[in-house]
Image: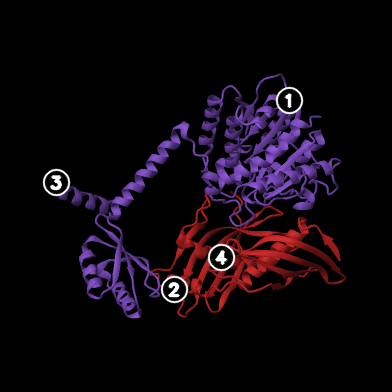
Chain colours: A purple, B red
Amino acid sequence: SNMKLILIFSALFGAALCLETFVGHQVLRIKTRNEEQLKKLQFLETLEHLQLDFWLNPSISALPVDVRIPAHSLQAVKVFLESHGIEYSILIEDLQVVLNREKQDMVTSQQLERSSSTFNYGTYHSLASIYQELDSLASEFSNIVSKLQIGESYENRPLYVLKFSTGGRNRPAIWLDAGIHSREWVTQASAMWIARKIASDYGNDPSITSLLNKVDVFLLPVANPDGYEFTHTTNRMWRKTRSKNSGSLCIGVDPNRNWDAGFGGPGASSNPCSDSYHGPRANSEVEVESVVNFIKNHGNVLAFLTLHSYSQLLMYPYGYKCTPPADYAELNALGEAAASSIQSLYGTTYQVGSICSTIYQASGGSIDWSYDYGIKYSFAFELRDTGRYGFLLPASQIIPTAEETWLGLKTIMEYVRDNPY
Amino acid sequence: MTELPPTHSQATRAAALAAAYIRYRHGSPGRGLVLRAVHRARRQDIDGVGHKYHLELVLEDIFGKDSTVNCTAEVLYHLGNKISAPDVQFTIEGELKNTDEADNICYNRIKSLKKELEAENIPDSFGNVSPEMEPIRVLAWVASGYVVWQNSTENTKYQLAQIKHVKQVKRSDEYLEFDYTILLHENVSQEIIPWQMTVLWHPQHGVEVTQNSPQPKHALD
């Protein structure tokens, strides 16, 4: 019959491509009652011609045994089990059906990814996919969101900023960036969720509505696109930019040691091969220079907030020196309030302090520059977790991380709105 | 004795080291102890000897989400140029949950594999760890506690970032042996350091690192 021919051809075809087919394979769950029954199963294991694939091997009689049985052995195994009074149930009737469904799900989900109206905020995305979603956001919330390009990366990728504004001319502004260190994937992912959150909350949430009625927000979700691309294609642990260093085979500068704040001082390396290499001079990295120029040209930025991972810390200046900033008391209190907001959602605890006392002395950092430039409310966040997954935070934690981080950011933004200077 | 704020970098580094050491001494594929909080930290400068940190810590077992355990630890970083591991003494309050059954199940499962286990990138780029690899991952994490302890100074804070590669080594005795290449993340310099370690494990004899060495980084990455 045709059906049989199709089966034979697909089996041959599959075999030719070294693909296995699991048509008619069943997965049984076997429950042994005692040692004797267990020994029978262990005996079964030795019969290679049955081609049994134990998903859970027989080890102790208290534990179930799961085994995949090819169609040709099914009858024999069931007769064997029944004749020895060994209980079993069918976990999977036909494995191929399950596999086909799974494949279909993956194809569908890939198709959904490509369609811009269903960007999944709970998963990690390629740079292209993120950039596509920025356009979607700007289009969907065109009354308050617009996309700006503030420069280009070393490898000529655009640096895109989303502007959230309800009008006015050069209103006071809040700056937020993510992903300056490319391996810190939860930051770019959280920034995307936060972008959608700000846009959709306007007109619905009284606090955000009043915030955007007074203040603009500028969000740079991928501050280091070259690095981000590299973490996807080549080295998941890449941190720096991808600029060439003259006289060295090593690539890249640590963009958070490249700002003009105690540049070249302790806590930054002069070795191009180091992950904390400060670069040949301050602002040598176009990714850093573009932000500096934007902020200087804007002239009215009141807060500078930057996202990193991991460690669960909320820090204020200074990093390049271990003396407290003039506004230490206010920044510490605001930081504690923000950490408290973060904790209120899922119990995630953040430690608050200056960069120097909390992690290390580190020169050339962004919030040191912004603070010394006159932007009083300068904070750096280190998001989840505390080391269990580190940079490799599972996607299931993206949205919870974004949600709690947003509460912390909101606390700071509301304070800035109410305390202009 | 100087009282340190628990959030101070010196306190958190010493605490991370103590936790790594405790994890190694008490860990197994069925028990992964992680630092939950630092309650108190004091530093004592001992002339001619080094710096000693007195810590009050809270640990938790990754397998018992809300079961925390208090402990006190003393970490002594030696002065001078000789490279020797810091001394760590600790006391755990109360008893740790018994993990014999979980360890035995894990041991038997691996023992009964037809081919020697081999895998890479655990977790993968997206943080995924398959259920079969979870015990292998916990074992690496426990063993890395030894490497972290042996190589820590007051100016370092190491975490296990990823298992690049693991291969089971066939043995004729009852021990399980694994050859790991791991990536350590050093939090102060921010470097990612590849490290090789050979790990022995048996449920009754605990975890042992028999060999370990840093690996060269690829300069052209």
Name which quarter of the figure residue A157 lies in.
Answer: top right
Q: Earlier in the sequence, mark 4 or mark 2?
A: 2
Image coordinates for residue A400, horizontal then vertical, percent: 58, 46
Q: Is residue A129 above or below residue B194?
A: above
Q: Earlier in the sequence, mark 3 or mark 1?
A: 3
Dot in front, 2 or 3:
2
Q: Answer whether labels 2 and 3 touch (C-beta < 8 Å).
A: no
Task: Kindly identify which residue carries mark 3.
Answer: A2
- The answer for how far apart the CA atoms under marks 4 and 2 are is 18 Å
Dot label at residue B140 = 4
Q: Give the side of residue B171 with respect to residue A36, left or right.
A: right
- Amino acid type at mark 1: His
Structural crowding at the residue carrying mark 2, measured as other residues with C-alpha within 10 Å and reported as few (<14), some (14–19) or many (≥20): some
Query: Are tags 1 and 2 found on a single chain?
Result: no
Task: Kindly identify which residue carries mark 1.
Answer: A298
- The answer for how far apart the CA atoms under marks 3 and 1 are is 72 Å
> In this view of the protein, can residue A31 be seen by the observer?
yes
Q: Is residue B197 above or below residue A263?
A: below
- SS for dot 4: helix
- The answer for how far apart the CA atoms under marks 1 and 2 are is 65 Å
Question: What residue is at 78 percent from the left and 34 percent from the top?
Answer: A375
> In this view of the protein, can residue A159 be seen by the observer?
no
Dot label at residue B108 = 2
